[in-house]
């Protein structure tokens, strides 16, 4: 992600997230029928990943941080060759960028070092981290509660996984578009909207349970003119 411009990082991260894998994995599982076949198929698909990793280059920034300037330059040159943008002018710019990065790292070494406990060093940092931690805890609990109890939902467990993946991916794409086209909105407000929506849905479930009611959708055979019936039962 370090080579991606800051403006494009969020939408690319969301577009390449795990959400589409819910759909793909549900389809593979449906046709696999058993765990052994599923694991064989997943392992076979990972062969392509191993091939891609063997062709990938180590991060030039990592080389620079380790002081391996020669290796960093060689990696940049190989990337330039793949892109077809090699030229003497770009070579000069590349050397200047590497030297600039080296100076920045040297200056960074001389500056004050921060450790884990600095996350809770001031009251403001403590508040920020507690809020983020609590929101992630709530989001993770809701997410994994749905995943690990998905067999409790009516209908096919495979189709439910597909629907779950589609919903996740839909909101990922929407958020990526908003973040890219409307940066003035800010991630804080979008995060607030998402949390508010989750709270509203959980409150709805709590109220219906507290009132002793549950909502169900019944499927009637094709004999009836109405296929779906929505009812509230006590």
Image: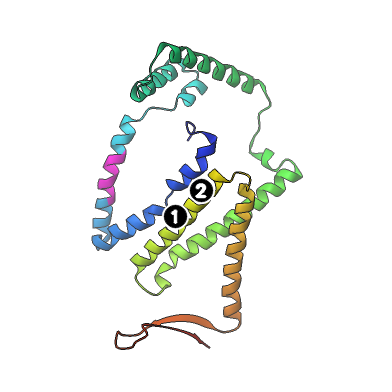
What residue sits right under mark 2 in the picture?
177
What's the residue at 24%, 60% (across, down)?
32
Residue 77: image quadrant is top left
What's the residue at 33%, 55% (across, down)?
24
Question: Which class describes the residues within 10 Å of circle 2: few (<14), some (14-19), or many (20+)?
Answer: some
Q: Which residues are magenta?
A: 42-49
What residue sits right under mark 1 in the picture?
169
The vertical placement of 146 against 8, above or below, is below
Task: List x then y, in percent, for residue 218.
Answer: 40, 83
* Residue 74 part of the magenta-drawn span: no
Element under disc 1: helix
| Front position in the image: 99 or 181 | 181
Question: Which class describes the residues within 10 Å of circle 1: few (<14), some (14-19), or many (20+)?
Answer: many
Task: List x then y, in percent, for residue 122.
Answer: 75, 42
The vertical placement of 88 against 154, above or below, is above
What's the residue at 39%, 14% (across, down)?
87
Task: List x then y, in percent, for residue 164.
Answer: 42, 62
**Nearer the N terminus, badge 1 or badge 2?**
1
What's the residue at 52%, 51% (across, down)?
175
Viewed as shown, does residue 137 lie left or right of 153? right
| Front position in the image: 189 or 213 | 189
Query: How far apart are the two marked residues, 1 and 2, measured between alpha carbons?
Result: 12 Å
């Amino acid at each position: 992600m370090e080579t991606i411009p800051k403006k494009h990082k969020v939408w690319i991260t969301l577009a390449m997230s795990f959400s589409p894998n819910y759909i793909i994995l549900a389809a593979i599982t449906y046709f696999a029928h058993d765990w052994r076949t599923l694991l064989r198929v997943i392992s076979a698909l990972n062969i392509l990943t191993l091939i891609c990793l063997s062709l990938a280059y180590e991060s030039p920034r990592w080389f620079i941080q380790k002081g391996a300037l020669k290796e960093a330059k060689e990696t940049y040159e190989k990337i330039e060759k793949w892109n077809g943008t090699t030229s003497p002018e770009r070579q000069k710019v590349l050397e200047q960028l590497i030297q600039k990065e080296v100076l920045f790292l040297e200056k960074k070494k001389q500056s004050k070092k921060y450790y884990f406990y600095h996350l809770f060093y001031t009251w403001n940092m403590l508040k920020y981290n507690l809020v983020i931690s609590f929101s992630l805890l709530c989001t993770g609990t809701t997410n994994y509660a749905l995943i690990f109890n998905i067999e409790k939902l009516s209908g096919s467990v495979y189709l439910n996984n597909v629907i779950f993946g589609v919903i996740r991916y839909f909101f990922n794409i929407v958020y990526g578009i908003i973040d890219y086209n409307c940066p003035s909105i800010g991630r804080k407000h979008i995060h607030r909207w998402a949390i508010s929506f989750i709270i509203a849905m959980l409150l709805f479930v709590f109220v219906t349970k507290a009132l002793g009611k549950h909502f169900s959708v019944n499927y009637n055979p094709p004999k009836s003119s109405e296929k779906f019936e929505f009812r509230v039962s006590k």
